[in-house]
Amino acid sequence: PVTIRRFGSSSAPVVAPNGRIFFVPYERTFCMYFDPTTNTFSTFAVFDAGVGNASLMNGGVLAPNGKIYFTPYDDTVFRFLDPDAYTIQAYATLTGVVPQASRYYGCVLAPNGKIYFAPSYLTTVFRAVDPSNNTVQTIATVAAGLGAFLGCGGAILHPNGKIYFGPGGGGSVLAIVS
């Protein structure tokens, strides 16, 4: 039997190399995980005192380096979780952008090792991170004149090697060749 506990909102469970299932914090400043070998939940506090926004992250993915990279939502800070040390570290900050204007809905790991973020309706910038050196780069910007861009509802990696971004609130399916 599994004990069900409520910890508040989280999104996108991710299985770490140690077998534990980590839940991406959405409306919390702590992280939780489930250990399937003992059927127990645990939490750990991880954020620095400067974090004041409740909906910090929305999605995550396990990178080849064993870290879980989170998708920034109401935040301009990009973070990853070290599932062995139980810590979350910031690795990049977007400057000149207000937190709600940098929202992303999920991310996907591509065969080239980069993690691509699906922009929400409040940003027209597609970004990716290279986990080998933790650099964030702009991949594309939605051109003006394409009509109202209503963001993406998430992203998937297709067996053909392309990343497809689902339309969020209407529009077209977008593809990026990785």
Image (spheres, rainbow, N blue to C red):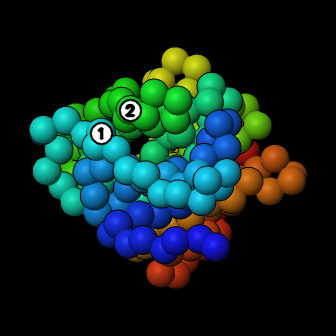
65, above or below 128, in the image: above
Residue 108 seen from this side: no
87, above or below 165, in the image: above
Residue under pointer 2: 87
Left or right: 74 with respect to 32? left
- Name which residue type carries label 1: Val
- Name which residue type carries label 2: Thr
Furthest-top residue in view?
Answer: 133
- Nearest the camera: 155 or 42? 42
Residue plotted at (48% across, 57% down): 41
Q: How many marks?
A: 2
- Nearest the camera: 130 or 152? 130
Residue plotted at (67% across, 51% down): 37
Residue plotted at (37% across, 50% down): 43
Of the two numbered discs 2 and 1 on the same chain, state the one appearing first in sequence.
1
- Nearest the camera: 173 or 71? 71
Report if the CB atoms under discs 2 and 1 are less than 8 Å apart.
yes
Indicate the position of residue 116 as horizontal and vertical percent values.
Answer: 57, 45
Residue 157 numbered mark, or none? none
Where, by quadrant of the figure, is residue 57 drawn?
A: bottom left
Q: For the residue carrying disc 1, how many other residues have a C-alpha within 10 Å: few (<14), some (14-19), or many (20+)?
A: some
Residue under pointer 1: 46
Q: Quadrant of the C terminus?
A: top right
Q: For the residue carrying disc 2, how many other residues have a C-alpha within 10 Å: few (<14), some (14-19), or many (20+)?
A: some
Indicate the position of residue 65 as horizontal and vertical percent values.
Answer: 62, 25
Where, by quadrant of the figure, is residue 48 drawn?
A: top left
76, above or below 14, in the image: above
Mark 2 secondary-structure assignment: strand
Indicate the position of residue 118 as horizontal and vertical percent values.
Answer: 51, 56
Residue plotted at (87% across, 52% down): 160
State the CA–CA distance, disc 2 to disc 1.
6 Å
Left or right: 126 with respect to 73? right
